Image (cartoon, coloured by chain):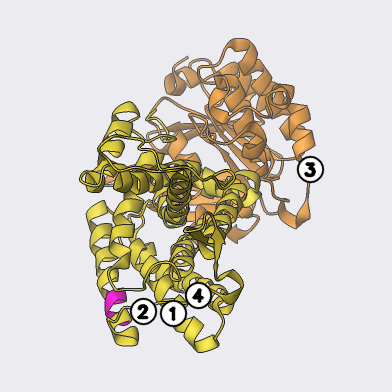
Chain colours: A orange, B yellow
């Protein structure tokens, strides 16, 4: 069976500087992958490259066997990847409902797992604030909105970049809980976060990125069993 | 409008600056509103194209002129102003689609100087095409028979039915544009794209198509303004130039990218210009810019402009 996502020899450049150096990565259907590493090691660039948002990218990216390495972001989104960017990126001039409705689309094969009602049920806070403008929301609510908006596209794979950064612990917990629910619905996720413990609970596999290369990958338990290993690359 | 007809001796409103009775005031008010509404049609397209595509389109006024010439040409060719109206808008929309595909898309993300240069070039091309097709004569277009004639205000004054119809028509178009942008999913996508293009694309919105449609719709709105104005004003070669400058004033006044702001700005400019000419004839040419300066001191990003984060 082909993996959902197969990345081979992926390189990404910002101007003259090479940020990703030959990434090899496979993600299975419904699999949760935690992507960790110190700041500036290329985690966000990897997610942005998968989404087609880094113009200068080389190598092979296959989603469900189809080559999407050179596709524009809208085509990649339509083939089943959704992106929850760092810093949220909600549309502040649109209401909560509008933020969700503008993105609504059946997934591949017409699947409609996530509807407006289901997303609002997943995030009761958003349902309460449905008429509010995006810029009136708190940081946590904005984060819920970006995740909800990504779900509205009924993706096969969700890329989540630093979703809990700067959030109060209770709100961060709620975000992790919803990521669990999303996984339960069968979508694969790649999560970038600094909270190693939360990642270890959610992820089937942890991938460690250092200087644009994957230096370590394995089950959370296996990585945790080797003392000093994660500390070296992640700094905890 | 303007209350029941009254007979009274004109009474000076402002000593030393002419006099005005209620009827004249009402007529001027209508003129100002009508001018503002036409201005809105042109400026709303300009603000959408600038807000969403990030392109400064200096040729916008040229499409207004083109609309007026299309009214003249199509009315003569088909014998019907209504056919000219529909045909003119359709031609302008298709022209917008073609120009976006051919030229404008190359300007996305470029610096403003490049955009100004290319759209200025476009003015020259459109002017030359107008010269070849229609010459440089001044033309007039008859108002459709249905809307000919005037409404009697007093024994001496009438108000042309056509001008009133232009008011109502432009108002309907303005409401339509507003509803489209603020109440439909297409409008949500357009607003989202104006705010964050990259994120909109990452949500699967084909932004090429959105861009092309917005550009063509903006061009069609400018041409529509020229089409409806043709029976009121004369159709002449330089008619787009003044309109372009005023439209930029409207866009800056209202806040770049804001259609509702353009509506407020257009009415403000229309009324300022009309009443300025009545009350302060010697200052009227600069009054609009005084108002613009005052508004920008009060709100540097325009009346409904998004504040810098």
Element type where label 2 sits in the image: loop
Which quadrant of the structure image shows residue B304?
top left
Expressed as whole percent of the image width and height from the top left, the position of residue A112 reads: 78, 47
Residue B298 percent coordinates (x, y): 33, 27
In percent of the image, x 52 and y 54: which residue is there? B154
The residue beneath circle 4 is: B88
Give the residue pinned by disc 1. Answer: B72
Vertical side of B139 occupied by A207: above or below: above
- What subunit carries mark 3? A
Q: Label 1, secondary structure: give it.
A: helix
The magenta segment is B125-129
* Mark 1 vs 4, N-terminal side: 1
Residue B105 placed where, x, y %?
39, 63
Of residue B10 and residue B216, the one placed in the foreground of this image is B10
Numbered badge on residue B139: 2
Mark 3, residue position: A113
x, y percent for residue A152: 69, 42
Q: Is residue B255 visible?
A: no
Between the residue at mark 1 and the residue at mark 4, the CA separation in whole angstroms equals 10 Å
Q: Quadrant of the N terminus of chain A?
A: bottom right
């Amino acid at each position: 069976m082909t993996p959902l996502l197969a990345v081979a020899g992926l390189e990404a450049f910002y101007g003259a500087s090479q940020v990703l150096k030959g990434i090899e990565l496979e993600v299975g259907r419904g699999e949760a992958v935690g992507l960790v590493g110190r700041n500036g090691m290329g985690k966000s660039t990897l997610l942005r490259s998968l989404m087609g948002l880094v113009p200068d990218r080389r190598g092979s990216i296959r989603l469900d066997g189809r080559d999407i390495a050179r596709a524009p972001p809208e085509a990649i989104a339509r083939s089943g990847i959704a992106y929850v960017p760092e810093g949220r990126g909600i549309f502040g001039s649109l209401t909560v409902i509008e933020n969700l409705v503008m993105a609504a689309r059946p997934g591949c094969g017409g699947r409609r797992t996530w509807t407006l009602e289901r997303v609002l049920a997943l995030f009761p806070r958003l349902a309460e604030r449905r008429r509010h403008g995006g810029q009136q929301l708190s940081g946590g609510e904005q984060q819920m909105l970006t995740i909800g908006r990504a779900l509205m596209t009924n993706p096969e794979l969700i890329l989540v970049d630093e979703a809990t950064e700067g959030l109060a612990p209770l709100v961060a917990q709620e975000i992790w809980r919803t990521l669990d629910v999303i996984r339960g619905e069968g979508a694969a996720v790649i999560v970038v976060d600094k909270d190693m413990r939360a990642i270890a609970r959610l992820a089937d596999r942890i991938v460690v990125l250092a200087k644009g290369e994957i230096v370590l990958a394995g089950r959370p338990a296996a990585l945790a069993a080797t003392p000093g290993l994660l500390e070296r690359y992640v700094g905890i | 409008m303007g209350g029941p007809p009254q007979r009274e001796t004109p009474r000076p409103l402002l000593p030393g600056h002419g006099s005005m009775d209620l009827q004249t005031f009402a007529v001027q008010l209508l003129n100002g509103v009508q001018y503002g509404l036409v201005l809105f049609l042109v400026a709303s397209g300009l603000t959408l194209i600038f807000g969403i595509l990030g392109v400064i389109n200096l040729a916008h006024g040229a499409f207004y002129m083109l609309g007026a010439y299309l009214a003249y040409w199509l009315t003569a060719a088909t014998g019907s102003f209504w056919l000219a109206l529909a045909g003119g808008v359709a031609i302008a929309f298709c022209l917008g689609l073609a120009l976006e595909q051919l030229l404008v898309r190359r300007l996305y993300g470029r610096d403003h100087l490049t955009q100004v240069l290319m759209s200025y070039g476009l003015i020259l091309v459109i002017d030359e095409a107008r010269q070849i097709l229609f010459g440089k004569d001044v033309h007039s277009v008859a108002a459709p028979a249905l809307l000919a004639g005037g409404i009697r205000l007093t024994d001496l004054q009438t108000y042309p039915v056509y001008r009133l119809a232009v008011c109502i028509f432009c108002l309907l178009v303005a409401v339509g544009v507003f509803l489209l942008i603020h109440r439909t999913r297409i409008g949500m996508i357009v607003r989202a794209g104006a705010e964050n293009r990259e994120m909109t694309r990452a949500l699967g919105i084909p932004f090429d198509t959105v861009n092309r449609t917005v550009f063509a719709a903006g061009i069609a709105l400018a041409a529509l303004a020229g089409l409806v104005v043709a029976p009121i004003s004369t159709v002449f070669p330089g008619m787009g130039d003044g309109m372009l400058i005023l439209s930029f004033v409207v866009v800056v006044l209202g806040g770049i990218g804001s259609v509702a702001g353009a509506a407020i700005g257009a009415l403000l400019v229309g009324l300022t210009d009309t009443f300025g000419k009545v009350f302060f004839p010697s200052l009227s040419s600069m009054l609009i810019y005084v108002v613009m300066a005052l508004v920008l001191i009060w709100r540097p990003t325009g009346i409904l402009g998004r504040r810098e984060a």
